[in-house]
Image (cartoon, helix red, strand yellow):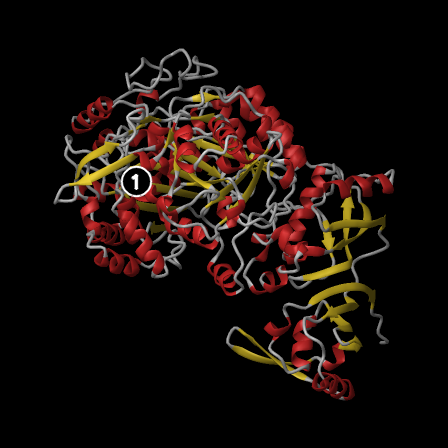
Amino acid sequence: MISTLMTRNFKQRKVLPFVNKPGRYLGLEHNSENKKWEMCSVRCALVFPDLYEIGMSHQGLQILYHILNGQKEILGDRCYCPDKDMEALLRQENLPLCSLESGRSLLEFDLLGITLPYELCYTNILTILDLANIPLRAEQRTEGMPIVLGGGSCGLNPEPMADFFDAILLGDGEEAIVEIAECIRVAKKEQLSRPQTLERLAAVPGVYIPSFYSPSYKDDGTIAEMKTLNPEFPTVRRRVLADLSAVDHLLHPLVPNGKIVHDRLGVEIARGCTRGCRFCQAGIIYRPVRERSPEQIIDLAKQGLENSGFNELALLSLSTGDYSCLSTLLPQLMDRFASKFISVSMPSMRVGTLTQEVMDQIKRVRKTGFTLAPEAGSERLRRVINKGITEEDLLTTSRDAFGLGWKVMKLYFMIGLPTETAEDIDAIADLAKMTKKVGAQTGKGRLQINVSVGTFVPKPHTPFQWERQISMAESQEKIDRLKEILPRKGMKLKWHDPEQSLLEGVFSRGDRRLANLLETVWNKGARLDAWSDHFDLGLWQEAAQECDLSLDDFLRPRSHDEILPWQHLDSGVDTSFLLKELEKAQSEAYTPDCRYHACQKCGLCDFKQIKPIVQDRKQEQKGDAGGEENRSLEAAEVIPTPVEDKHFRYTVTYSRMGDICYLGHLEILQLIFRALRRAEIRTNFSKGFNPSPKVSFGPALPVGTQSQAEFFIMDLPEPLTDLQATQSRLNDQLVGGLHVEEITPSKGSIAQQLITFYTIRLDQPLTGDDTDRIKQFLASDEFLIQRRRKGKIKEINIRPLVVKLQAKEEHSLSLELISRATEAGVKPLEALAAILAKEQKQLLSSELIKTGWKELKEAN
């Protein structure tokens, strides 16, 4: 968001030193693209409306990013929602929100593609548009402004956000995004007006233009009519990618600079699920099931890991345990990557699918957490929701998991499901107790059962879309009941905040009246509502009152003949099928999975282009009549075979200059570990539960400090035959700003006492008073500073730590500091601020460069 352009203009130091986690705003990631702006005819910015660490974990945005940049005339940049501190600084400095790669304001792009991943990110979208100086409402945008396109899982009911978007893509984007960009290119070439461009976009299958539809409302707030203003487009049908076989855009994954939520290589092994859970929107809007071949998955994993340096592989799907070739795929993946210390995240599994082949693989991994999602405590309620698994299935799975060594079991349930009774809530506790009991019988050591509950939110396009959502008070009452009846010893209860669930329910089935609510609450300061430390229901309630809206009204049941806000948007699944499923829920009847059984007549497949793709239909697994059970084996790490220890140590001297200095010490470590993997420099690993590369780094630098003299010592199992070639290979894999200067055989361990040399270039010239204070400091024997740690104040004498402090010119100082590994030290700007009697914040815009170091050898 500051990135290249602002670096050229020297504006980054006005912002980056003053924000938390500045690495979020750098760009520069390995495998990111930085095309020349003037060489591309269509410039697109893909925007994820949440913080970097969430957005960088989103597979869909990365897929579209690489597809766009794979087109010669298309530029694809990224942007993420800034945190509140960055937003405030951008406004204070009157700087626009920019993309990471080109550093251009979002206003300069032709197309903004904004992901709609979950309801609680909607206020963030308004923040992004406003910071880019783009009018919030689509109707207020003028010629030359970017087309604002939405897409993602919330795109199947975008009505609460419809007034803010020019266009919304329903469904899969891999093919559609190129067609949309081409449409923009032609519109620019033909100099079409904005309305004419929207008409062209409406002709792209799956593209919905909200301004082509106008709802009217009855006095009770229900929709009287959804009027189609352009008769050519009465409805819009979801776009479905027929086959997942194209993979070029998946081979060079973006590698984050900082720690993100899912910091690993994700390989999508299948898309879609037809298990038929009646509460599940994803099972409707991502069907049919389309599996990749095992050969393709292995190739994607191999190339993705080689090109990224990740040390963890995750197999992604709505229901990975249902992948038809799983029992043959897992051994091949584990055999290939175990010796490289790459962990394989075990997939979500179905109850009843612990085959002997899968059990053999489970024995090879370290056990941390194991998640089961019964969803409901009683068998009756599981039949209602078409979960179709029995208590016996659940307990057998738990027994197997505990017997294989798992110590922690997480059980996930929903409260407020249709037809739920007090007995169903009590059954949650009963099932948790039984799970613990079977664990005590088969497991060893101390076992932990974590019970997690969330409030059921009726989702559009599901059989339960007409049902009511329980109130906050009802949710809290059920949670309190579970607190009362669950044992405290060996069990832990967690729950999703009912206040956030209320808002999710409002926007999940809301309509265009909510646009005024969103804008009102955003103006009141609502930001980052998905984060509990930012969420404030009080603001929403105040805004709703001002807009004359009742939030609870949106939770009500809907009649079957009522016009639903999303009724003009076609998921591909017939409404008659959903109603039939609702009837079957009331009679507790089971609907089997169409990938292994007969077509259930949902209306989606034409069996020519759109059809299920299952690699091995013979792999119908035991318990299929029991439905799907989500089981996640978390952080499963393959235990590599021990090898004979040989140690060859080398010192790598490197520089970190430019914006890369805004990454923290641990972030730099991770970048270097991954660069070593990509450069095929194999290190030794530590022993123990979590093996890590045997690489020792020099003292940590303060964030924002550049350096010409960094180093690390790497411990290798084999000697390097060509140091110069290794240096060149490693430099090819390092991100911009990091550069290896030399690799030499290491002569010993890292020095514990150092003198470090710095040059400080000040933002403002030294005054006469500053010069006098420096002289007074150098003439003194003692100079105490205070530090507060854990509520206690500690004094440190920094005078003996400063070897030299000298003004080189009016804007520049040279500083030499002593640091000892066993003692509290002082940071350069911390010392200078104390000496000059300034707030440290006043000096953060200074340029601080470490120019060298030497070992301090003191006389005994």
Q: Amino acid at mark 1?
A: Glu
For residue 247, which quarter of the picture?
top right
Q: Please tell me whether mark 1 sits on a helix, a strand or a loop.
A: helix
Left-right relation of 687 to 180: right
- Disc 1 packing (10 Å; few <14; some 14–19; many ≥20): many
Foreground: 473 or 491? 473
In the image, residue 512 sits, relative to residue 499, either above or below, namely above
Side of 11 where 855 appears, left or right: right
Residue 769 horizontal/vertical position (percent):
70, 86
Quadrant containing the C terminus is bottom right
Badge 1 is on which residue?
159
Q: Is residue 229 visible?
A: yes
- Residue 454 image offset from top left, x and y in percent: 31, 45
Q: With respect to residue 736, does 84 lie above or below?
A: below
**Nearer to the camera, 681 or 485:** 681
Residue 342, percent from left and from top: 62, 36
Counting labels gives: 1
The residue most toward the top is 608
Residue 324, position as x, y percentages in the image: 46, 20
Residue 374 shows in this picture: no
* 542 and 719: which is toward the camera: 542
Which residue sits at x=82%, y=43%?
Answer: 727
